[in-house]
Image (cartoon, rainbow, N blue to C red):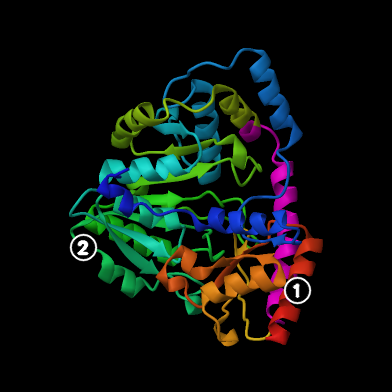
Amino acid sequence: MRLASRMALLGTETAFEALARAKALEAQGRDIVFLGIGEPDFDTPSHIVEAAKDALDAGHTHYVPSAGTAAAREAVAADVGRRLDAEIPASRVVITPGGKPIMFFTILALAEEGDEVIYPNPGFPIYESMIRFAGATPVPMRLHEELGFNPDPDELAALATPRTRLIIVNSPNNPCGSVIPADTLRRIAELAAETDAVALSDEIYKDFHYEGSHVSITSFPGMWERTVVLDGLSKSYAMTGWRVGYGVLPEPLVEPVTRLVTNSVSCTAAFAQVAAGAALQAPQDSVREMVAEFAERRSLLVDGLNRLPGVSCPMPGGAFYAFPNIAGTGMTSAEFERGALDEAGVSLLAGTSFGAYGEGYVRISFANSQANIREALARLQRWLAER
């Protein structure tokens, strides 16, 4: 079968490929500790599940408007407005099945051949994949370990050109767990204004801050008019399988993005939108409790990683990932990933899964129990000591 040539431009999310390899070994009888996938290991809070059950019983099983139900859009607008201290009209909210559609549809709506999109590298691999698929040119914004895995403002300024249509920021960051300082965010906002570019602010990890609080690029003058805020319920509420994401869009983008929803997925599941409203409007105790547990795991993991021969790991400020430097082991990122799985029984991801600037690093998720993190560290210690 002959595929369209554009399919060669489409990448993948290597976390799922690594998970498949690890699951295949587990099926053969191997005991594997899974620290690769970026998914909270908590169950969805019971009050959200009950709201979904009630919605199903009440008949919320039919098509709804492509942009989302009025109730869900209003719940998102109220929650975002409260967090970011802004008046958000519900009309600027579009609900999608997960956060990726907002990413994809924003890029499709804004960028085409001849345009450039600046994106973080190391960064979520779908950024680059979608930029290429849309026909635009991906321009990597390098994140430097010595800057806390953040961009150098002078380097960033050199990347911006009249062809820059979109600048993607992700804070807290996947895979590095880094948080962009306010001064750097301000410079990115200024660059967006200078080049008349739109910012796509991926804030899916906004609740996972371990020091300080979340700062959005929308807090800087004029940025609400040129920023797409991408967020969703997958991480904060352990709802990865529910597929509920959303975008808060500048008014001119609402109709085009809604049209892309109509032409692709029609709408987001009605009962899941009811559950989303319940999640956002209820007390947030479950979120705070989960983040507190992740904070303990973060300290446990980073302390253990820094005891491994040839490994050094800075303390991540957010998300639930560590991004240790493994150059001292003499292995490439891919070799470390493969050896950790095959020889130590620990599933993690090569830094190059997140872009070329990830070479020399691996991503380790601490979305697993403290007992399993200890076991993984012990296995890695034995494996590296025996090499």
**Residue 292, picture quadrant:** bottom right
Upstream in sequence: badge 2 or badge 1: 2
The residue type indicated by label 2 comes to: Thr
Identify the image quadrant of the N terminus.
top left
Q: Is residue 326 something one can see in this rendering?
A: yes
* Residue at x-position 75% and y-position 73%: 379
**Residues drawn in magenta:** 279-308
Question: Camera-side residue: 385 or 248?
Answer: 385
Question: Camera-side residue: 175 or 208?
Answer: 175
Q: Is residue 302 magenta?
A: yes
Q: Is residue 71 above or below residue 113?
A: above
Where residue 209 sits: x, y (%)?
62, 58
Q: Is residue 199 above or below residue 247?
A: below
Identify the image quadrant of the C terminus.
bottom right
Label 2: which secondary element: loop
For residue 175, the mark is none
CA distance separating discs 2 and 1 = 48 Å
Q: Is residue 111 magenta?
A: no
Where residue 35 sits: x, y (%)?
66, 61
Q: Nearer the viewer, mark 2 or mark 1?
A: 1
Q: Which residue is mark 2?
A: 161
Question: Camera-side residue: 220 or 250?
Answer: 250
Where residue 366 sits: x, y (%)?
68, 61
Q: Is residue 366 above or below residue 69?
A: below
Magenta span: chief secondary structure: helix
Q: Which residue is mark 1?
A: 379
Is residue 321 found left or right of 3 in the rendered image? right
Label 1: which secondary element: helix
